[in-house]
């Protein structure tokens, strides 16, 4: 293939060259509290094991394989990897965490005690049995990262237009990836130098029957030929796609390999299920397999590394190798890789010079492509590590050992640190903390159950969920295909909603709609001498609402009406309903949760001051700010102090035992209010009413707000025991999942079960 | 019943007393161009005749009966009546209109030539045959208004709380309506005096066999005993509900009446299907039947009259009658009614004094109830008419005759004037002209086909449509239950829509989304040297969009990006697609209309100046302002003049024959652009693509905007022959129904057919 340097610098190509698609697979072992290999089965909570898209088991039952969807950036792919990790760590038994190192923890003396993954498909089990025989179970226990990378289609298509060596696109694309693969194999020793992180082995990895053993520590046992690699008689050429395919076939036919996938090259050519098809359809991406787990990164790899690997693969397309003979080049690469893998982590690498050659090429490329700070930092980082071996991953690890922290303890400590971190904010999902809580919780449940999740739009909270061939789209966690379009349009119109509920025989506040102040004032007599409420027709969060519990003067009425008309062209005046307001969350006519919201408050203990009680209450990890937590911190600002004053308190008041002081009048959770789950206590008669009301509106998912006069007395549909004051579409779900008190309700699960009726039930 | 005056004045009751519900039935004859009785059948276009809720036939095949839904105000009920009239007048054959008088036009010599309504239900036909025998067909031909009125439930319930005469609500409600009915029967002569409008008869109404004949003109033949009334042996008491029911039953049993409904009282007690049930369930409203058609009101009755009748019925509840004996009272009422009916229209009525007594009561009530200008005007109107008989309806008619306009000609002229008016703006619907055109057109089609239409919210354009027991809700004419909720949410997100379309294999403009100016500027190289478009992510009506057909400088790009970010937090930059933009309106995957929109323009004739050509083009009745017409007037402001200048023209330029001058760059219809239907010309391959694309998004109703490179060349899904630039939910329909040129497409009908699959197809 001609050199591509001139083409890659073209203004039209430069920006596209920087784009790519990423996918990561990460293996790792489950461990127990002592840092020993877990003895339990793969958790059943992950649902169907056959086709879980993101949580699988690799060789052994204890070996998790976490798989991200394909993403368009390093940041995005890491977000998915982070989310999957949190799902796993929170789903594992309390006494289990993830072993953070590539080399496994101490292995059982008896090889038979290493459990092969208990998969359902027979061929999967048979294959693993074969591997156990061919390589021994122990080597199968090492873990690493598989890094899948694809250049932007647009980039390859335009590059194809510019180049002259290839007449058809498929063979051009194929040879692009072949060149990258060859160069990567040739220069991968640098990756091992920088990222190698498997210096030592634990008892049971090398068995007595082993003749030779390396002198530990090294940079990476895993990437050396002490790792899990094919036997020496396996050589596959990367010169052309035909030779690549034919070599693999020969090896399988001659029984050297049991199957195509037994060919464990550090670089696999990908794009088709069967290797044979690569000839015709070509290569569409490559899989890099020689990346050790980074024990210092909570997810085994960090963003900088993902970006660097992309940059390195770009470099592999950019440079033209010294060796012209493709097979020769591979042999050189393999030799250097093995040597560097087995170097002492704190020594300079013996290929230091070639390292600098690569650095020069990096700088040349960065300049030619007008790359920005980001890439320059990467280059500096490589330069620094070339000079300072102790700063490489293996270098850092060995330094830890020398400071007295044994490898085993290090694995245990780091692994449990990660677990603790994952449990800190169970209502959030790493990688997606900027999204709405309800969406984060839904994503958690979906990933756990093996539903493939793709975020189509973060800002708009739009997800694609797919389970096998069944695809659903979800916005804001419960706006779905389950509801038909007209229902939310009706619900967002308070007047129409009331009309329909009333016609269906439900109690709603009597009232009138007015389209002008004059009109409203003419009707004043209807309201003044009873309790009433004035609100804008399409009000939100109580803006522009005035409540007069015992009627009001004409002047007060007039003022309230004018305030409301500032918010909307139409205003509702309704009778005030006595009682307590409850939120009924209904799905498909069934009430799944009932919530009571109480204004921000503290209860005295006879010792502490109110401000201290507030501080204590705010210690609840469920409380936070900016809707990043299911409950909000209670403030002590002017409104709150005023509210206290009305009760005869100051923040310094020591509140008598059992006495409640309120810091707010409104019960909104967003101003520090308490959310109390009362699903069990609520009488069925009210649940029936709320469920039927939602059904009568045609709503599948809705939040019905009922005011109940006396929750202890049974409700009757046509009695004044209750009134429906609002029907909400897209009702919040996170507050039900993590209430201040009472049982949490996993409504996100109910939504998923309704969307995917085929999901296995727990 | 105790006097209610003190209670009705209570502050809590006063406002409720003024509320009520209204329903109007209006009979009238179809006539031909000569003003003669139509000889055609009831038009089949009105669909199923058995249960058309608003357009029926009464006794004869030519006698239309128009029925409004129940409404909450005089204004509202008149709106429905107006709409139904326009539907009928536009649906009738060109050579037919509606006879505006209560007395029929000249009737055929041979009675058998009067066609009995050709109804499908046998009992309906039999009943009419019986009536023909019992009363003769001729009298059956008179027409009038039936005015149904119900006091506000809330009012009656609260009044019941206050009163002391009745122990149960049902009998209280019943006696309220009985009192109103009695008083109305007693004092109805005043209604005849004011609103009587049947002074003379046309040939064929009185036949030779008739012994006696009144001396015409009179105030109202129809309400006199020369009208269509029961024979003298029919007397039914209104003293109690029991007597009322028993009397009617006796008459039926003794065969004096064939059925309950043959009892033609000027006031019917309503609430139950069978009269017998009134005893148990009570009366819920009353039906006033002695209102003549007002020939001067386009719909046979005007708002003032509807309000006055309500006011009069309130008065009937207010006053306590002189006569204590209920039957005696009725006899007096009947006698006076007949006398006044037969008075000469230009004479003072002989019950002038009693008229003043009623006036005094009206004033007393108005004062006690704090009534406003409106009611005072009504009182003044009555007062004025009492003094000036010539101002009454019959008075006005007789004046017309005396000035030489024969009654028959008057009927013809007024009837055809109404028809002309109804045809003026076929894209609007009387009574609802403030609503969106698409909604008005949908309502027209629904009413025509016998779908019951209720406007639930004018502002929000929300309708309830029902056909038999099948109810559907519609917002903005095509937001319905047909689409599921997530689809429009996806469509309103341009990026997600493009992702899904691209994944489904459709062509969309290549592009990127950016969330910051910096991000967008870093990617500038992707776009600058080709044509591109910069737009806010959630843009509307082209706000914040910049188009660079041949690429642009970095500075121009930067400026465009900054403009776009002023509109949204996210901005899309896309390649510019060469070609012509078409709107494909798709329903259920089928393309029902294709529209080409062309910027405002005029074509020269070599004689006229551009400003004259614009004036001519603006004469098109389809052009209007403020979206009250399917096309907008072309303006000649600065933008237009500038645009002309760029082409080397001024408004005064005389444009050569066949040469087109554009007054706008943008093709929006809202700025005077032309809408051209090209549904037939468009190649099927593109329709297929548009339909499939909509389907792939799951959209049932949508407007797909395609840019087509060469509309003459076949389109291929995976080729660059086209690109989908937008998918719109709730696409406009009126512009397809009334295009500037090409065939109109009745998409509203398609929507109705899809919503109501059971609708009979034409």
Image (spheres, coloured by chain):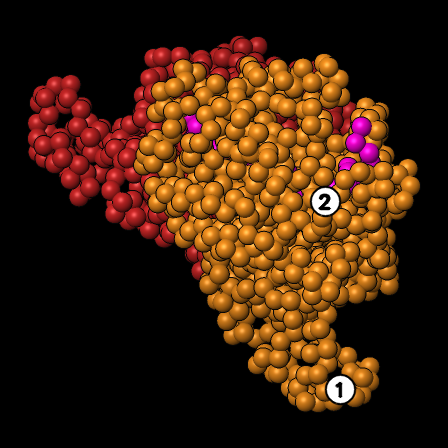
Chain colours: A red, B orange
Q: Which stretch is magenta?
A: B134-157
- For the image, the number of numbered tags is 2
Mark 1, Cα crowd under 10 Å, few <14 / some 14-19 / many 20+, is some
Q: Is residue B339 rendered to the left or right of residue B183?
A: right
The nearer-to-camera label among 1 and 2 is: 2
CA gap, disc 1 to disc 2?
65 Å
Quarter of the image for the C terminus of chain A: give it: top right
Within the image, what quadrant is residue A138 found in? top right
Q: Is residue B97 rendered to the left or right of residue B75?
A: right
Where in the figure is residue B140, as x and y percent of width and height?
77, 37
Question: In the structure shown, which secondary structural element does the residue marked by tag 1 occupy?
Answer: loop
- The answer to whether residue B407 is above or below residue A44 is below
Q: Nearer the viewer, residue B202 or A410?
A: B202
Q: Nearer the viewer, residue B340 or A204?
A: B340
Where in the figure is residue B457, as x and y percent of width and height?
54, 44
Residue pictured at 53% horizontal, 34% vertical: B186
Where in the figure is residue A647, as x and y percent of width and height?
13, 31
Instruction: Answer whether residue B137 is magenta in the image.
Output: yes
Residue pictured at 65% horizontal, 71% vertical: B633
Same chain letter for marks 1 and 2: yes
Q: Is residue B361 rendered to the left or right of residue A140?
A: left
- Using the image, name the chain to which the residue with label 2 belongs: B
Of the numbered discs in the image, which one, if any, rests on residue B608? 1
Quarter of the image for the N terminus of chain A: give it: bottom right
Of the numbered discs 1 and 2, the one sitting upstream in the chain is 2
Residue A211 visible to the viewer: no
Where in the figure is residue B45, as x and y percent of width and height?
82, 44
Residue B318 visible to the viewer: yes
Residue ID for mark 2: B214
Instruction: Answer whether residue A673 is magenta in the image.
Output: no
Residue pictured at 71% horizontal, 48% vertical: B215
Residue pictured at 10% horizontal, 25% vertical: A655
């Amino acid at each position: 293939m001609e050199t591509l340097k001139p083409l890659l610098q073209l203004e039209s190509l430069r920006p596209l060259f920087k784009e790519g698609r990423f996918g990561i697979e990460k293996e790792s072992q489950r461990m127990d509290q002592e840092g020993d290999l877990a003895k339990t089965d793969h958790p059943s909570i992950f649902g169907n094991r056959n086709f879980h898209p993101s949580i699988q088991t690799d060789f052994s039952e204890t070996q998790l394989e976490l798989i991200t969807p394909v993403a368009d950036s390093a940041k995005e792919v890491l977000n998915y990897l982070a989310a999957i990790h949190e799902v796993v760590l929170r789903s594992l038994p309390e006494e289990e965490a993830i072993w953070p190192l590539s080399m496994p923890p101490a292995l059982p003396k008896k090889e038979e005690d290493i459990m092969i993954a208990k998969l359902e498909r027979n061929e999967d089990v048979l294959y693993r049995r074969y591997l156990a025989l061919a390589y021994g179970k122990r080597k199968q226990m090492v873990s690493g990262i598989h890094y899948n990378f694809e250049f932007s289609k647009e980039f390859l298509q335009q590059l194809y237009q510019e180049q002259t060596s290839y007449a058809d696109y498929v063979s051009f694309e194929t040879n692009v990836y072949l060149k990258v693969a060859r160069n990567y194999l040739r220069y991968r020793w640098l990756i091992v130098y920088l990222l190698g992180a498997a210096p030592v082995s634990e008892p049971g990895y090398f068995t007595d029957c082993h003749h030779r053993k390396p002198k530990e520590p090294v940079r990476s046992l895993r990437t050396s030929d002490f790792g899990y690699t094919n036997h020496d008689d396996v050589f596959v050429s990367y010169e052309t796609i035909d030779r690549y395919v034919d070599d693999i076939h020969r090896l399988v036919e001659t029984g050297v390999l049991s199957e195509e996938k037994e060919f464990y090259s550090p670089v696999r050519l990908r794009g088709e299920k069967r290797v044979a098809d690569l000839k015709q359809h070509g290569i569409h991406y490559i899989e890099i397999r020689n990346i050790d787990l980074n024990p210092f990164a909570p997810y085994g790899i960090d963003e900088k590394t993902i970006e660097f690997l992309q940059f390195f693969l770009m470099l592999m397309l950019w440079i033209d190798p010294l060796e012209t003979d493709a097979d020769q080049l591979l042999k050189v690469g393999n030799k250097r890789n093995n040597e560097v893998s087995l170097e002492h982590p704190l020594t300079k690498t013996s290929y230091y010079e070639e390292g600098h050659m690569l650095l020069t090429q990096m700088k040349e490329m960065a300049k030619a492509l007008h790359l920005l700070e980001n890439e320059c930092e990467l280059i500096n980082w490589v330069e620094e590590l070339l000079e300072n071996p102790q700063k490489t991953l293996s270098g850092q690890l060995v330094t830890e050992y020398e400071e007295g922290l044994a490898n085993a303890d290090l694995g245990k400590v780091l692994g449990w640190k990660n677990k603790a971190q994952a449990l800190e904010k169970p209502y959030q999902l790493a990688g997606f903390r900027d999204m709405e809580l309800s969406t984060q919780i839904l994503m958690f449940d979906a990933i756990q159950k093996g539903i493939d999740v793709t975020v189509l739009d973060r800002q708009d909270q739009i997800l694609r969920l797919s389970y096998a061939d069944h695809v659903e789209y979800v916005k804001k966690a419960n706006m779905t295909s389950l509801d038909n379009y007209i229902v939310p349009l009706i619900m967002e119109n308070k007047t129409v909603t009331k009309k329909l509920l009333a016609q269906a025989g439900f109690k709603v506040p009597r009232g009138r709609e007015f389209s002008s102040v004059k009109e409203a004032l003419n009707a004043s007599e209807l309201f003044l001498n009873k309790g009433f409420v004035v609100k804008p027709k399409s009000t939100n969060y109580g803006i522009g609402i005035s409540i007069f519990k015992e009627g009001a003067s004409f002047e007060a009425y007039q003022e309230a009406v004018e305030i409301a008309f500032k918010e909307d062209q139409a205003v509702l005046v309704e009778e005030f309903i006595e009682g307590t307001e409850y939120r009924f969350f209904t799905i498909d006519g069934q009430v799944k949760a009932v919530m009571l919201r109480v204004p921000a408050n503290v209860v005295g203990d006879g010792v502490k001051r109110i401000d201290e009680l507030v501080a204590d209450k705010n210690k609840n990890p469920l409380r936070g700010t900016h809707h990043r937590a299911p409950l909000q911190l209670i403030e002590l600002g002017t409104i709150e102090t005023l509210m206290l004053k009305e009760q005869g308190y100051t923040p310094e008041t020591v509140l008598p035992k059992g006495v409640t002081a309120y810091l707010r009048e409104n019960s909104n959770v967003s101003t520090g209010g308490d959310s109390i789950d009362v699903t069990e206590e609520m009488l069925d008669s009210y649940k029936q009413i709320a469920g039927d009301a939602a059904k009568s509106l045609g709503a599948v998912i809705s939040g019905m707000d009922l005011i109940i006069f006396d929750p202890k007395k049974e409700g009757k549909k046509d009695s004044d025991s209750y009134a429906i004051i609002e029907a909400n579409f897209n009702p919040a779900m996170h507050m039900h999942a993590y209430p201040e008190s009472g049982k949490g309700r996993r409504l996100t699960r109910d939504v998923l079960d309704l969307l995917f009726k085929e999901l296995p039930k727990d």
